[in-house]
Amino acid sequence: MTTSQATDTRRRIYHRPEILADRSTHYCPGCGHGIIHRLVAELLDELALGPRTIGVAAVGCSVFAYDYLDVDFVESPHGRAPAVATGVRRARPDAFVFTYQGDGDLAAIGTAEIIHAAARGERISVVFVNNGIYGMTGGQMAPTTLLGQRTTSSPTGRDALTTGYPIPITEMLALLPGVAYAARGSIADPSAIGKTKAMLRRAFEIQLAGGGFSIVEVLSTCPVGWGMTATASMEHLANEVVATYPLGVMVDRPRAVEG
Amino acid sequence: MTLAAEAAPPPVRPVLMKGNEAIAEAAIQAGCDAYFGYPITPQAELLEWMARRMPELGRVFVQAESELGAINMGLGAAATGARVMVSSSSPGISLMAEAMSYMAGSELPLVLVNVMRGGPGLGSIGPSQADYFQATKGHGHGDYRVPVLAPSSIAEAVDLVATSFEVAERYRTPVMLLADGVMGQAMEPVVPTYRVPERRSEAWHLTGADGRAPRVVRSLHLQPEELEAHNRHLQAKYRTIEEREVRWAAERLDDAEIAIVAYGTAARVARTAIERARDHGLAAGLFRPISLWPFPSAALAEVAARSRAILVVEMSAGQLVEDVRLAVAGRTPVLFHGRMGGIVPTPGEVVDVLRRAWATTEGRPQETR
């Protein structure tokens, strides 16, 4: 048997998803957006959703998601992505619609929009990236910032007395009957990333089945904003952030909204 | 019976309609695909009409959590190419200013109805024209303009709804239909024949990238040169709108020595005042801007050149009057009469002002007649 006749038995386990544009991102070293973009792209590929997807880009570092995910996108004003997505989904019932929002966008300025999209059981999927900080504007405190965490606008550490407590918004949303799926994952290690992908898949499939509103909060990193190395930020995520924001599925009722 | 008689359509009888409901139905007849709103007086009947009619036609109706929600739902629906109407009244329009800026930047067509009430702040629920500056000079941030159409009868409002959709889609811009509490609440006969703007499929509609390159609807351009180029493009579009979309009406101006400039409900009052003034030998006429932006400056300048005075009548402290002064450019005196707080000026008040204007400008030479 010659080499030329040998059967190639290598199994392809890794490739660039078609939806993921072949260009380097503007994100900082160690930023979690790259991983989460990839998960979204893999799922859009695997579920063959590219041709019918309309994404809603929110204000923050990830507004440029449309530069990296090759699907139709509309850019939203800060915090309004769930309202914009509502308009898209209602006007095009055949579209697959997702928002990609940070924690400043979703849990501060956009609280009214996210709560009411969830309350209506809007058939959209929300990718909620929580890094506990306003990354794009230079690392200010967000409603999600951990107690004691130093940021550029809480220079001595977040103090509950004057700035309150981290907001567990996904748990809050899970209380609403219109929410078909709410879960929290992380990108701290390959195992967590795999679980997060499974959560996103479930969220997307529930939208496709018309089941209601779905949200996956993804705990992510901001090494520059946190003042850490990329490695240290991953350890901080796995050890500290998860202690405030427990991982897991909060609600999974695929027929929250009938029809 | 002749063939012609058989073929003749049944006569279309006018129906009595409330302004808010007539505007809503006109939008439906113009092919409005989606409506988003939030309750606020004095436009609530518009939302209520849509709540009943849109679902029965299989179209989109959502009562949003706020005016922010409503206008941003409109933004999303417009991005897909849907024909969208959103309505509110003054305080709600202030909340929508942000999205108007985004839609101007993203070049999204949408018709926003403002049924104006008294301000500032919570103000009153009475009719007002105090949002002229807000409507015509921009609502939100950035260098942008929005075409503003102001009806002065409910029949005209119905017609201008179709025009608003046409202008919005022709130029990829939000358009404001500017009414006031009287226009919204009054009932007038409307002939239920409607114009349906032609529907086009555009190369920017978000429909899913099926067999084509992905599309992005955005207003963000971080590179200064790119953003300046985008602004130049927008400004060129605005110049085209200024050339092509100016609308006004002239009434009894042929022999008028004093011209009243007024729009919307104030123009209705002015019309009555002009009739009475003429009974007393005062030759007055009405110049009525219909497009408040683009403002009919050139036409008004001509009127000013042959008038001994211009009288601006508004339901505000004096906002339209600034555009009038710019157009008149000192050719003739510009006088002003305004009421605020939800009060509509009476024809008697306007006649009194006309009399004084007549007396103080007696013998003033006019350039041309």
Image (tube, coloured by chain):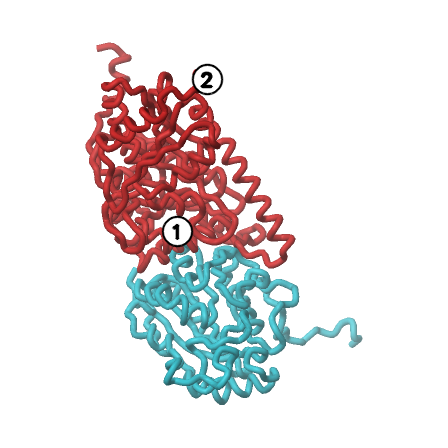
Chain colours: A cyan, B red
Q: In this view, does A110 lie above or below B77?
A: below
* Rendered residue at 60%/78% (across/down): A30
Mark 1 closeness class: few <14, some 14–19, many ≥20 residues within 10 Å: many
Q: In this view, does B15 lie above or below A215?
A: above
* Rendered residue at 41%/59% (across/down): A85
Q: In this view, does A124 lie above or below B179?
A: below
Earlier in the chain: of badge 2 and badge 1, it is 1
Same chain shared by disc 2 and disc 1: yes
Mark 2 closeness class: few <14, some 14–19, many ≥20 residues within 10 Å: few
Mark-to-mark CA distance, 2 and 1: 49 Å
| Quarter-of-image position of residue A212 | bottom left
Q: In this view, does B348 lie to the left or right of B295?
A: left
Q: In which quarter of the image is the C terminus of chain B?
A: top left
Q: Is residue B304 left or right of residue B63?
A: right
| Residue named by callout 2 | B368
* Rendered residue at 28%/69% (across/down): A177
Q: Where is residue A96 in the image (x, y as percent from the top left)?
A: 44, 59
SS label for mark 2: loop
